[in-house]
Amino acid sequence: MKVRSGSDFDVQEPNGPSAAVRRWLIVAGLSGALFLVLSIFSVWIYIRQVENGYWLSKYFEQHQQMDSVHRKLRLEWSRLQDPFLLETMGRDQFGLHPPRPEQRVVMR
């Protein structure tokens, strides 16, 4: 018992849903599944973005600390290359003195 043949809204027959209703259910089910998969993917992408933000922040802090240590080491290196400072440190800290005449060796 059908209202009109060929219409999109067929009345359910005693044997089960018609082909149009089955197609509509399949399309609706696939659309729902696609929506679910895309929603899960969107949430996963957002979580990864937040994790990467924390990761980037942590490594940026480490980079700033290492940069600070690098600047201090360069300053210390340049300070230790000063010949007058080296002479003073050798005399005061290590008890070194200029060589006596008998300790000098002349190379020819």
Image (spheres, rainbow, N blue to C red):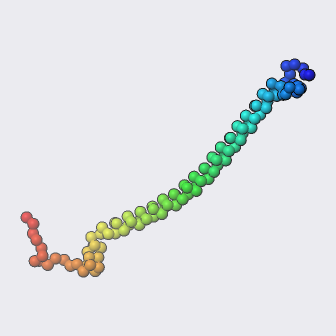
Closer to the camera, 83 or 18? 18
Closer to the camera, 78 or 4? 4
Residue 33 visible in the shown view: yes
Residue 9 visible in the shown view: no
Q: In which quarter of the image is the C terminus?
A: bottom left
Q: Is residue 100 left or right of residue 3?
A: left
Residue at figure coordinates x 39%, y 65% from the top left: 73
Residue at figure coordinates x 76%, y 31% from the top left: 26
Q: Is residue 105 left or right of residue 90?
A: left
Residue lying at the far front of the rendered structure: 15
Q: Is residue 108 left or right of residue 26?
A: left
Residue lying at the far top of the rendered structure: 5
Q: In this view, does 32 lie above or below 108?
A: above
Q: Position of residue 51 (x, y in %)?
A: 59, 53
Residue at figure coordinates x 34%, y 66% from the top left: 78
Q: Position of residue 50 (x, y in %)?
A: 62, 53
Q: Where is residue 94 in the image (x, y as percent from the top left)?
A: 26, 78
Q: Is residue 12 above or below residue 107?
A: above
Residue at figure coordinates x 65%, y 43% from the top left: 41
Find residue 107 and report its image quarter.
bottom left
